[in-house]
């Protein structure tokens, strides 16, 4: 009798470990692709521009017949979905490999772009460059968010750090005429917000989310007030910073597509590559990172082995603020070139979404931020070439994905165990 | 971020545990910060400080002028303007304050219901937008006799706000998804959804218009204003204020006198203990978020049916969803406290516009003042440190410093 119930439990366990979320999601997207390929098929030619003016190697634009390509890609997608289904049923791991999902996503994106650009040209390089531009501040914000949350402090004030970073970079960069000093000022601005957050959250044990929200309001009000009262009164003096020049990396920038996208950028973007790697390396390969993760996962244990939990949190929140501040500088010293009221426009919250979507991992969060930037740019470009999909739904996408991610419907997201909780020594 | 027992436990204490003195001092300090900002950026003060050491009185006088001017503009704009002719005109600023306070109180009540249950509802914006869209759609699509139409619109708005809030509640209860993140994300989803509907002919866009704006509400759905009632003046204060007073009483009754409110507070104090005591915590999360969203929906309805009845755009929430959080914190999540907090912030907002017009002090200053008030109220030890007040005596609920805590 007992052996029977034992087998039942075991089979029940295997059934539980078999996840149907991925195949169901893939089937859903495959159906969308099939609808695009057959039910609402579009005729004409889709063209993908592969070079930008000034490229060393000029590639001919790639032109494909819209209807046939989308239909073929839709069939490929359907095949991939069936494969995923089969893998869950009979595969060794009873799960869908992540590589298959990635391939599926790319094929789906290509199919969708082909369908949307019937009779038009999509500048692929321009799309990627714009996506990187929109993603850069998000990456800095997300890296700041990752450090804060890994140390156990939820950083809702990212928006405020980006905004004050943008503001101080504009003012200092403009008054001194040195964009580098502007960058330093942006870091100082981010640190200032972070220090207030840390002081209230750690010393006065005020709830981190409350302080974060209130700090966003404070920075919005303060920068808005000073913008109207001071910056507008003498814009040439206070709000006309020199932008960082574009520095092409010799050699690498000549590679087709990749070169202009990744290696014909300003110093802030190169700094982003370094920062993403450094945060990853620091968090997972150094003593500093071990301590940060320890105070975020299990502060009591960290305290027991002699780590000063609140001190570690305090200074890492400040560091996170500095990184987020650089993201703010990107607006005023690179992409826009002057401060305007509320110019970060909710980017801090998207960065927060990227932190969660990237599962609190610096590299994954970086890619999540770039993905969100790409989605935003894709939306504006589809608006220009006249896509039949309403732009609002594209803009909504990062947020919807994040809700699904937080609810555990896409992948498994687990926050640092002690995130958001103050540590009170007993 | 899924298990947050101690956090909600502590928030409740923090929000309800301070005293009135701290609130008053915090408001005073915040106004001081605002005054300093005004003085520092005032051109006349700057001119006078150029010869500060030759004639220091000039700088002081100029600073006094700047602050005095701003304060009197604030008061005249928010409460009573004696320079106008006729009683109705003189008292109009006060009715404007009440008009702006109406949605703030409603949404603030929503936030505080969530707070008392240990939840953060940052989704007031999204809930208001969805509710406003619903109220607006009913208000011009379905002709009905007068009071019925208005009530159906309000109910529709409250229901939609509750549904939108309920999404976060369901996700929190079923999957443990953190309601802060979910509500923030749903704000944007609602914004883009309503923006899309507003520019789509046949949905919410006004017929014959190209802009992203809705048609005007039918007369039968519009809330009567104070001027309609008295037959004098041009008051914008509308029946939404009466609804909000009723809502405040209702929330007070629910939280303090009903079994549901008891369960809310029990879960807010300690979800584990509540679970052991047989309270269905998941259900409480769902109901609390729905009630919270419904109250934000009432704020949306008052915007569409009372304040902006000639058609609205996607900015109809006017930042009230976020202001509501500060209102709830200021009111310490007690219904009548929220009512008072809403009146104060309504007055600051109304007066802020007058100040902007009369003294060229940007309205953003009000945001700074609000933020400083809430920061200080959230950290009573800081206010006590500034004013060298004694820490609360035995049975103190808050630590003077974290290091002194033993628990």
Image (cartoon, coloured by chain):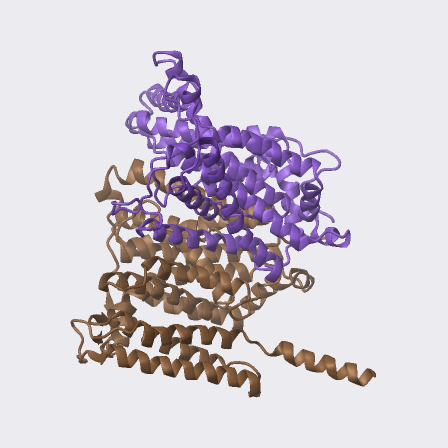
Q: Which image quarter: residue B359?
A: top left
| Residue in view at x 52 percent, y 85 percent | A87
- The x and y percentages for residue A423 are 64, 54
Of the 4 image quadrants, the one containing the N terminus of chain B is bottom right
**Camera-nearest residue between B237 and B98:** B237
Q: Which is nearer the eye, B33 or A157?
A: A157
Between A366 and A305, the one lying in front of the other is A366
Where residue B29 appears, x then y in whole percent?
50, 31
Expressed as whole percent of the image width and height from the top left, the position of residue B347 reads 45, 27
In the rendered image, which quarter is residue A287 located in? bottom right
Residue furthest toward the right?
A: A1
Q: Is residue B4 above or below residue A99?
A: above
Among the chains pictured, the one given brown colouring is A
> Is residue B341 shown to the viewer in this render?
no
How many discs mark residues in the rendered view? 0
Q: Position of residue B62 (x, y in %)?
A: 34, 22
Viewed as shown, does residue A147 lie left or right of A34? right
Q: Residue at x 74, y 84 (%)?
A: A7
Q: Is residue B180 visible?
A: yes
Identify the residue at image location x=71%, y=42%.
B259
Going by the image, does A285 lie left or right of A345? Answer: right
Left or right: where A314 falls relative to B187: right
Using the image, determine if residue B66 lies above or below residue A64. above
- Rendered purple, the chain in question is B
């Amino acid at each position: 009798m007992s052996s029977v119930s034992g087998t039942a439990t075991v089979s029940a366990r295997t059934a539980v470990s078999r996840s149907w979320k991925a195949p169901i999601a893939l089937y859903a997207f495959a159906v969308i692709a099939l609808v695009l390929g057959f039910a609402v098929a579009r005729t004409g030619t889709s063209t993908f521009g592969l070079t930008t003016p000034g490229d060393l190697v000029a590639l001919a634009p790639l032109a494909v017949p819209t209807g046939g390509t989308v239909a073929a890609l839709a069939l490929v997608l359907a095949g991939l979905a069936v494969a995923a289904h089969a893998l869950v049923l009979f595969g060794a791991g009873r799960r869908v490999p992540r590589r298959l999902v990635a391939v599926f996503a790319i094929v789906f994106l290509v199919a969708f772009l082909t369908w949307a650009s019937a009779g038009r040209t999509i500048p692929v390089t321009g799309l990627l460059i714009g996506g990187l531009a929109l993603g850069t501040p998000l990456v800095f914000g997300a890296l700041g968010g990752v450090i804060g949350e890994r140390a156990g402090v939820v950083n809702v004030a990212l928006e405020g750090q980006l905004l004050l970073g943008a503001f101080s970079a504009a003012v200092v960069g403009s008054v001194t005429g040195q964009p580098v000093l502007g960058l330093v000022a942006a870091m100082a601005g981010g640190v200032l917000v972070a220090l207030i957050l840390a002081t209230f959250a750690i010393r006065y044990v005020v709830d981190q989310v409350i302080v974060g929200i209130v700090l966003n309001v404070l920075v919005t009000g303060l920068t808005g007030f000073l913008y109207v009262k001071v910056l507008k009164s003498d814009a040439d003096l206070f709000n006309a910073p020199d932008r960082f020049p574009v520095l092409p990396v010799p050699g690498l920038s000549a590679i087709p597509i990749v070169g202009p996208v990744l290696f014909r950028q300003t110093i802030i973007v190169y700094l982003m590559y370094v920062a993403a790697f450094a945060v990853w390396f620091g968090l997972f390969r150094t003593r500093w990172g071990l301590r940060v993760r320890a105070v975020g996962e299990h502060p009591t244990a960290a305290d027991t082995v002699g780590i000063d939990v609140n001190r570690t949190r305090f200074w890492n929140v400040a560091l996170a603020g500095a990184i987020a501040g650089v993201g703010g500088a990107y607006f005023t010293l690179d992409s826009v070139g002057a401060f305007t009221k509320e110019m970060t426009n909710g980017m801090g919250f998207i960065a927060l979404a990227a932190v969660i979507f990237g599962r609190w991992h610096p590299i994954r969060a970086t890619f999540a931020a770039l993905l969100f930037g790409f989605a935003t740019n894709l939306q504006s470009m589809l608006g220009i070439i006249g896509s039949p999909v309403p732009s609002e739904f594209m803009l909504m996408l990062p947020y919807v994905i994040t809700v699904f991610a937080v609810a555990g419907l896409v992948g498994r997201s687990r926050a640092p165990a002690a995130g958001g909780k103050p540590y009170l020594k007993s | 971020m899924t298990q947050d027992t101690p956090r909600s436990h502590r928030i409740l204490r923090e929000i309800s545990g301070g005293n009135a003195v701290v609130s008053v001092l915090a408001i005073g300090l915040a106004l001081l910060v605002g005054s300093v900002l005004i003085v520092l950026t005032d051109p006349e003060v700057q001119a006078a400080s150029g010869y500060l050491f030759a004639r220091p009185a000039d700088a002081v006088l100029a600073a006094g002028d700047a602050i005095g001017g701003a304060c009197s503009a604030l008061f005249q704009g928010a409460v009573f303007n004696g320079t106008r002719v006729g009683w109705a005109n003189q008292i109009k600023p006060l009715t404007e304050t009440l008009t702006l306070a109406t949605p703030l109180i409603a949404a603030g009540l929503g936030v505080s219901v969530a707070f008392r249950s240990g939840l953060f509802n940052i989704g007031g914006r999204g809930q208001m937008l969805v509710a406003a869209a619903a109220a607006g759609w009913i208000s011009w699509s379905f002709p009905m006799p007068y009071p019925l139409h208005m009530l159906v619109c309000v109910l529709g708005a409250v229901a939609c706000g509750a549904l939108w809030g309920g999404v976060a509640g369901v996700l929190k209860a079923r999957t443990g998804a953190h309601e802060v993140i979910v509500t923030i994300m749903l704000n944007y989803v609602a914004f883009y959804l309503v923006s899309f509907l507003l520019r789509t002919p046949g949905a919410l866009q006004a017929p014959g218009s190209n802009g992203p704006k809705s048609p005007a509400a039918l007369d039968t759905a519009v809330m009567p204003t104070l001027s309609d009632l008295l037959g004098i003046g041009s008051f914008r204060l509308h029946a939404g204020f009466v609804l909000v007073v009723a809502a405040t009483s209702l929330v007070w009754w629910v939280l303090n006198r009903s079994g549901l409110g008891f369960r809310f507070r029990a879960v807010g104090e300690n979800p584990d203990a509540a679970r052991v005591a047989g309270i269905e915590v998941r259900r409480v999360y769902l109901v609390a978020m729905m009630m919270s969203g419904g109250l934000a929906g009432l704020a949306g309805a008052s915007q569409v049916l009372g304040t902006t009845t000639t058609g609205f755009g996607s900015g109809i929430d006017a930042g009230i969803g976020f202001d509501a959080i500060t209102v709830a914190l200021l009111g310490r999540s007690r219904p009548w406290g929220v009512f008072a907090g809403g009146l104060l912030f309504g007055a600051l907002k109304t007066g802020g516009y007058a100040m902007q017009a009369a003294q060229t002090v940007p309205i953003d200053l009000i945001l700074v003042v609000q933020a400083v008030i809430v920061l200080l109220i959230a950290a009573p030890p800081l206010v006590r440190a500034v004013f060298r007040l004694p820490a609360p005596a035995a049975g103190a609920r808050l630590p003077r410093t974290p290091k002194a805590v033993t628990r």
